[in-house]
Amino acid sequence: MATLVTQILPGLPTIDEHHVDRRRYPDGVAFMDGQYVHMSEAKISVLDWGFLHSDATYDTVHVWNGRFFRLDLHLDRFFEGIKRLRMKQPYDRNKITLILNNCVALSGHRSAYVEMICTRGSSPMFSRDPRQAENRFIAFAVPFGSVANKDQLERGLHVAISDTVRIPPKSIDPTIKNYHWLDLVKGLFDAYDAGAETALIVNANGHIAEGPGFNVFVVKDGSLRTPAFGVLPGITRRTVFDLCAEIGLLATAADVSGAEIKAADEVFITSTAGGIMPVTRIDDTVIANGLVGPVSRRLMDLYWQKHDDPAWSTAVMYP
Ligand code: PLP
C-alpha cells in the first residue's frame, strides 16, 4: 500500500511514497518536473546532457537547526552560473526559495543538505545543438552530510596532495559550480592509495588548488591564506573571510605551495558539507604539533554560532 505523506504545506501536492526503498535512497524530498517526490522517484532521462556531458550547474546550501545558512549567496552563485552557461529555467528567485523551503519542510529534516540543479536537459528532436535543449531544474533536500566525521573534526584530517592537475579555468570556469570531478575523484583514489582520508589537488602552476568539494586555508603567524587561482569561490571560504574581517584577522587569496602548506601553523578545509574542518597531517608531515589549532577552533565556533543569527541565516517554514 502506498503511504501518503500527510505532513505537507497547504496547497502542495502529496508525496506518494509507493516504491520507496529506504535501503537505497536517503530519506528526503526532491522537486522535479513541477512535482515534489520522494528521493527514490527523482530520476532523469539518460539522454539529459547533464548526465551525458556534465552539462549542468548546481549549488548546495545547508540547513542547520531549521535554518538555511547564507541562502542568498548560494542563490546568487546559482543564478550567475545559469546565466553564464546560457541556460533558462522557469523559476524566479522567490519561487526557487519556496521550492527549496518546501523540499526541506516536506522532508521534515531540521539539518539538511539542499541542492538546486539546472541541467542542459535534452532536445525533443535529439538535436546535438545545445540551443535546442530544454533545460531542467531539479532541487532536493536530504540529511546533512559532512566531509569530515566527528572523530576527524576532533583530531583533524589526514590529507594527501595528489599531483593531479585541477581542470584549468580556461577550459572550465571554476566560478560556475559544476560536476567536472574526474580530477578530484582521481585525487581521492590517490589519497586512499597513500593511506590518507581525503585529497588536495594542484593547479596548472603546481600550487595547491582545492579538494573534492572543499577549499583549503593555511594559517601562518596569525594570518590566513587560501588559493586564489583555479578554484571554486566557495561560500564557506567567503564566510571565513567575513569572520576574519569581524575578528580582525588578515585573510588573503594567493598562491599556496605544497611546501608552504606543510610548514603552516594550522590548516583547515571549508565546505557547505561540514563547514570549517581541521587538517592535522598532510602526506607524511604532521602540521605544527599535530593538534587542532586555536585559530581553526575559534573560526569553527564562530561559524556555527552564526547559524542562529538572522543576519546570516533564514528560518525554514515547516508546516
Ligand atoms: N570546491 C569545490 C570543487 C566544490 O565542489 C565545493 C563545494 O561543493 C567547494 C569548493 C566548497 O564550496 P562551498 O563552501 O560553497 O560549499
Image (cartoon, grey):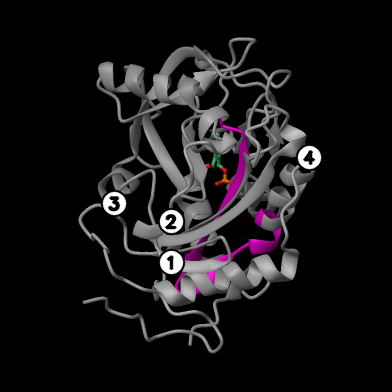
Query: In the rendered view, would you say 260 is above or below 124?
Result: above
- Evaluate whether residue 85 shows in this view: no
Q: Out of 130 and 66, give the one closest to the viewer.
A: 130
Percent across and percent down for residue 138 are 56, 55
**What residue sits 47% from the left and 76% below the top?**
105
Q: Amino acid at mark 4?
A: Arg
Badge 1 crowding class, 10 Å Cα cut-off, few under 14, some 14 to 19, many 20 or more, is many
Identify residue for label 2. 42
Tell me, yes or no, whether the two marked residues, 2 and 1, touch with CB atoms within 8 Å. Answer: yes
Q: Amino acid at mark 1?
A: Val
The residue range painted magenta reads 54-74
Extreme front residue here?
125
Q: How much space separates mark 2 and mark 1, taking CA atoms? A: 6 Å
- SS label for mark 4: loop
Q: Residue 37 got which mark?
A: 1
Identify residue for label 3. 150
Q: Left or right? Give the position of 62 relative to 55.
A: left
Q: Earlier in the sequence, mark 2 or mark 1?
A: 1
Tell me, yes or no, whether the two marked residues, 3 and 2, touch with CB atoms within 8 Å. Answer: no
Tell me, yes or no, whether the two marked residues, 3 and 1, touch with CB atoms within 8 Å. Answer: no
- Is ligand 1 closer than 8 angstroms to the Cβ of mark 2? no
Identify residue for label 4. 86
Q: How much space separates mark 3 and mark 2, taking CA atoms? A: 30 Å
Q: Earlier in the sequence, mark 4 or mark 3?
A: 4
Instruction: Name the quarter showing ligand 1.
Output: top right
Query: In the rendered view, would you say 105 is above or below 181?
Result: below
**Mark toward the viewer: 3 or 1:** 1
- SS label for mark 3: helix
Q: Left or right? Give the position of 214 relative to 41.
A: right
